[in-house]
Image (cartoon, rainbow, N blue to C red):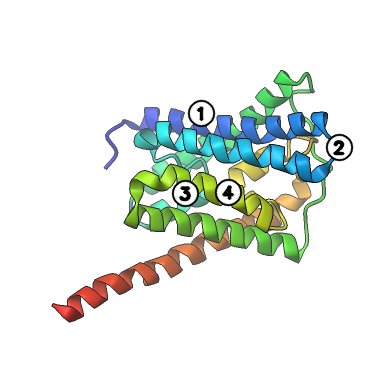
Amino acid sequence: MHSFDLPRRLVAEGLGTLLLVTTVVGSGIMAETLTKDVALALLGNTLPTGAILVVLITILGPISGAHFNPAVTLVFMLKGELRPPHAVQYVAVQVLGGILGAMVAHAMFGLPLLEFSAKARTGFPQWLAEFIAAFGLLATIIGGLRFREAAIPWLVGLYITAAYWFTASTSFANPAVAIARSFTDTFSGIRAQDLPGFIVAEILGAMVALAFMSWLLRGAETTKEVTQ
């Protein structure tokens, strides 16, 4: 049960997603400004993103659960830990917060508040990468909740830091962030027409992670019952 009322939880979700996207987009702009080396720019985009996730989950997690991600919200709704009407509101503020985050990043760097991305990110390898990215993220969260809840901020931050580099898509793993990134024509952008493939892959990855981890973690309970 949440100890904070719904309005405060929604503000925490919106603010967290805003700051997450501000970091993703802003660090991408900064990296692209400082270097023409794509690998170095990606590193400059990766480290701030992993770091801000540790901070945001630590300070906002006790309020809202720190989803900042519709795929995470969907999983918690299916687990019965979030009512469907509240889940819909979580997703709405996540998407809105993400778009506002892109606008904030643009404002800080003197760019138009909103611009449509022209960066192509499509095709089966990209979709597979997003499936794997979302699967791993949800597996990390579910496993962390079971075995080391206090470590979840670090687990998620480290997972996303790693996934930036081992996935072909640089690990969006988040429909709200993907939507927000379609409104920036900078280093971290994605074309709007490429969003459906990314979002479907992310949701499927999250659903498979829920099913797989539910089965995997149930094994310990079964073993305990057999040995008693």
The image shows residue 91 at horizontal and vertical percentages of 51, 42
Q: From where the camera sits, is residue 138 visible?
A: yes
The residue located at (79%, 31%) in the rendering is 115
What residue is at 46 percent from the left and 39 percent from the top? Answer: 90
**Res 63 quadrant in image:** top left
Q: Are marks 4 and 2 in contact (CB under 8 Å)?
A: no
The answer to which of 36 and 56 lies nearer the viewer is 36
Residues at marks 3 and 1, CA–CA distance in whole angstroms: 21 Å
Identify residue type, mark 3: Leu
For the residues marked 4 and 1, what is the alpha-carbon distance in whole angstroms? 19 Å
Residue occupied by mark 4: 160
Dot in front, 3 or 1:
3
Q: Which residue corresponds to mark 2? A: 36
Mark with earlier residue (3, 4): 3
Residue 100 against residue 163 in the figure, above or below: above
Q: CB atoms at circles 2 and 1 under 8 Å apart?
A: no
- Left or right for 149, reference 160: left
Is any part of residue 173 visible from this angle? no
Q: Disc 3 marks which residue? A: 155
Secondary structure state at the residue bearing disc 1: helix
Q: Earlier in the sequence, mark 3 or mark 2?
A: 2
SS for callout 2 = loop
Element under label 3? helix
**Image quadrant occupied by the C terminus:** bottom left
Q: Which mark is residue 15?
A: 1
Q: Residue furthest bottom?
A: 226
